[in-house]
Amino acid sequence: MDFTAALRLLRGGHRLARRSWIQPGKYVYLEPAALCTSPEGTERTLVAHLRFVTADGTVQVGVQPSHAGLLADDWYDVDAEPPGGLAPGPGV
């Protein structure tokens, strides 16, 4: 799928990855807006943003897709497909 379709799924709480990513286990998800407390003790809104989970489980905050990622059509829903393969067909 392209990034437009991927973004719709991200907004719905899905985890997305690209088939061209070599290491398994990587994915992107949307962290919704939330309240946080700043160092001076003021409550502020932390805006919604993308987070990237690396193959070793490290989370990178505030990810911006590259131009290649925005133009790619190899995005897929991590939870809808088994790792490294296509989702099973009907009746499987």
Image (cartoon, rainbow, N blue to C red):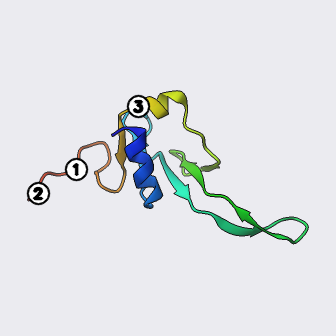
Helix, strand or loop at label 3? It is loop
Helix, strand or loop at label 2? It is loop
* Residue ID at (8%, 59%): 91
User: Label 1 crowding class (10 Å Cα cut-off): few <14, some 14-19, many 20+?
Assistant: some
User: Label 2 crowding class (10 Å Cα cut-off): few <14, some 14-19, many 20+?
Assistant: few
Q: Position of residue 31 (x, y in %)?
A: 57, 59
Between 14 and 78, the one nearer to me in the picture: 14
Q: Position of residue 6 (x, y in %)?
A: 40, 46
Tag 2 and tag 1, C-beta contact below 8 Å: no
State whether residue 24 appears in this view.
no
Q: Which residue in the protein does label 2 denote?
A: 92
Real-space Cα distance between discs 1 and 3? 20 Å
Assign the C terminus to one quadrant of the image: bottom left
User: Label 3 crowding class (10 Å Cα cut-off): few <14, some 14-19, many 20+?
Assistant: some
Between 89 and 2, the one nearer to me in the picture: 2
Q: Which residue in the protein does label 1 denote?
A: 87
Sequence-wise, which precedes: disc 2 or disc 1? 1
* Residue ID at (48%, 27%): 68
Q: Position of residue 82 (x, y in %)?
A: 28, 51
Between 30 and 25, the one nearer to me in the picture: 30
* Residue ID at (35%, 45%): 76
Q: Which residue in the protein does label 3 denote?
A: 72
Amino acid identity at mark 3 = Ala
Q: Decide: is 21 above or below 26.
A: above
Amino acid identity at mark 2 = Val
Helix, strand or loop at label 1? It is loop
Q: Residue furthest right?
A: 40
Real-space Cα distance between discs 2 and 1? 9 Å
Amino acid identity at mark 1 = Ala
* Residue ID at (32%, 48%): 83
Between 84 and 17, the one nearer to me in the picture: 17
Assign the N terminus to one quadrant of the image: top left
